[in-house]
Amino acid sequence: MTMSVAATKNIVLMGLPATGKTSFLAALWYLVQHSQVASSLRLEKLEGDSKYLNQISSAWASYKPVPHTRIDSETVVSMLLKDARTNQTLKLSFPDLSGESFTLQWTMRQFTEGYDAFLRNASGGILFISPLQYLKPIRIDQANPLIEEILGGEQKQEPLQDRSAPLKPWNPERTPTQVQLVDLLQFISGRDYFAPPFRLAVVISAWDKPSQLGMSPVEWLAKEFPLFHQFLSSNQKTFETAIYGLSAQGGDYSQRDALMDKTPSDRIEVVGIGISNSHDLTEPLQWLMR
Amino acid sequence: MSAAPVTPVPDLIDLPTGKELDESGALKLEIARPVRLVVVAGPVGCGKTTLLTSLYELFQWGQVSGYSFAGSHTLPAFERRCYLSRTASERAAPDTERTPFGEVRYLHLRISPEDLSREIDILFTDVSGETFERARDSTLECRRLTFLRQADHFLLLLDSEKLIVKERRWEVAHDSMTLLRSSLDSGMLSANCLVNVLWTKFDYFQAASGPDHERFLTQLEGEVKTEFGSRVGRLSFSRIAARPTQVDGLKFGHGLPELLTYWASDSPRERSMNLLPPPALGSRESELYASRHFAGSGE
C-alpha cells in the first residue's frame, strides 16, 4: 500500500494591526469542518496541535472578538485539507503574525528570520486591509479650508501650532497606510530569492461596511488607497493580484442578534471577480493555488 | 535571588533603510537599471525640496499626467520631508524642513506610463542650497559636484517670491545665471543636458500681477536664451507653484504634471545609449503640452 504525500502550500498572511488576519483563520477553520457552505476545500483530518485554531474558531463561532495575536508570536498554523475538485490532499500553512510585527517592518526596517524562511517557500500571500482604520496622507492645505469652515474662521486666529513652536517629531508609525503597504511588498520583492510573479490576494476585511457605498473592492481600493493601487497596477509582473472584499464576522458584534439568525458560515461574505459562492471563504485560497 | 526570565529575541534581518540614497546607493541603482538623473539646483529656500515632496504628494492621490507610481527606494525619506506639510505634524501652516548642508543625497521614484510598457526610474538630487551657492561662487567647488556630469535634466529654480521684489530681482536672476555659467564653464554640465528654468512659487507672481512683472520675465527669459541656449541640449522655462498659498486659482502642484511628462519623455543619456523607444509622443493632453512647451526652445 502506498501512502500519498500531501502537497504543502505556504500562504503568507500579511497586514497591519487589526486588519482581520486572525478572524480569517478562525472563520476558515470553522468553515472547512462544516458542510454549511458548498466549498471545494474541506478538512481531510485533524493532525497535530489544533489548540490555537480551535480557540480562535470558538471565539468566532460565539460572536466574540478573536484573541489578539501577540507581537512576538511566530505561530505557524497548518490545515490538512482535501480539494474536492482535484481529490488532492493539501497541507496549507499560514504564519499567524501580529499586525504590530508588520508595522515594525516599516518602522524598524527589519523582519525575522522565521518570516523570511516562510516567505522563501511561500506559494503566495494574502494581504489584509481594514476599511475601518487607516491613515490617509492629508495635507494641511487640504484640511485648513475644512477646519476654517467648521470653526467659522476662528482657526486663523488660534493656530494649532505656530512656526516657531517646538516640533512634534516625525513618527513613522503615523505614515499613511498605503505607503506602509507599498514598502511591505517592496521588502518581499527585494529578497534575493524572490521569483515573480508572486500571487497576492488583497483582502479588504469588514467588507459589510464599505459595501454600503456601492463600490466594488477594486473601486474602493483605487479611491481610498490610490498610491497603493497604482503600485499594484504597475507591478503586475511582480505581483499577480486579485482584490476581494471579505466579511468574516458578517457584521458588527454589537448588533449580533441579527447575525445569530444565520448559520455561522452564512455570516461570511466574499466579493470579488470570479467569486462563485459568496459565502465561501476559501475562494481567495483557491485562486492563490490555481 | 532568581534571574528574571529571558524572552528570546528572534534573529532579525535588516531590510533596506529607505533613507535618501548616497552616492553608492545611487550607483548601485544605476548599475541595475537605466536611471534618469534630475538635478534640482538653486539657492536656499527657493523650493527645491517642496517641488519634490509636492510631486510625491500628487501620486498619493492619483496618477500624474497618466503616469502611475510604480515604487520607490526612498519612501521613508519622502515621508519625512512631507511631514511638516501634513496634518499629522499638527501645524497650522505647511512648511518644508531645510535640507542640511552636506554630501549629495538622492530621492528615488519609479513610474509607469498608462500602457505599462516600461518603468522609468528617476533619481532626484536632494542637495542643500548652500552647496549650490558655493558652486556658483567657485568653479573648483562646482567640480566637486560630480553628479552634475550625469544630469539628464538640470532644473534651475528661481524664487518668484524674491523676483517680484524690484530691488532684488536682478540680483536673484544674476545669481542663478552665474550658477548655470559656473556649471557649464567648469565642464560639469554636459552639452546634451536638458536645462529647465523654473519660476518657483509662481503664485507670488500671479498675486502681484502686472505688466511690469510679465515684462521682466520675458526679458529675463530672452537673456537666459541668449546666454545659454546654444550651450545646452535644450533650454525651456516653466511656471511652478508646488504649494500655492497666494492665489486661489492655482492647484496644488501647479506645473508639476507637465514637468514629469517632460522628464519621462526624454533622457540624453538613454538616448546616447539607444535605450529610449522612438520619440513618439502619445496623444495625451499632457504629452502634447510637453511637446509644445519644451521641445526645441533654444535649439
Image: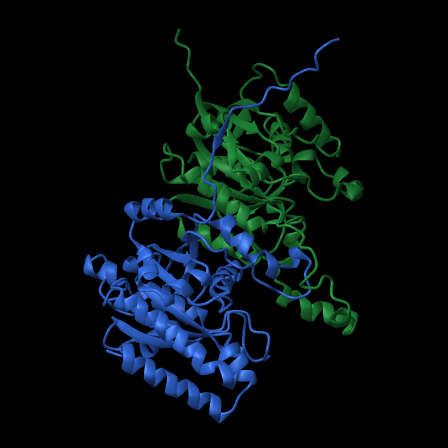
Chain colours: A green, B blue
| Quadrant of the snapshot with the C terminus of chain A | top left
Along the line of sight, the residue nearer the viewer: A20 or B119: B119
Quarter in which the N terminus of chain A is drawn: top left
Decide: is B125 above or below A207. Answer: below
On the image, the x and y values in percent for residue B73 come to: 43, 47
What x and y, as percent, mark residue B56?
Answer: 49, 59
Res B133 quadrant in image: bottom left
Residue name at image x 52 percent, y 48 percent? B76
x, y percent for residue B217:
42, 85
Q: Nearer the viewer, residue A183 or B96?
A: B96
Q: Looking at the image, is A225 positioned above or below residue B175?
A: above
x then y, percent, for residue A150: 76, 69
Q: Judge whether residue B117 can be spotted in this image.
A: no
Side of A137 where B122 appears, left or right:
left
User: What residue lies at 65% left-to-right and 18% top-to-bottom?
Assistant: A51
Is B173 drawn above or below residue A213 in the view shown? Answer: below
In the image, farthest residue toward the bottom: B211
Residue sitting nearer the eye, B296 or A23: B296
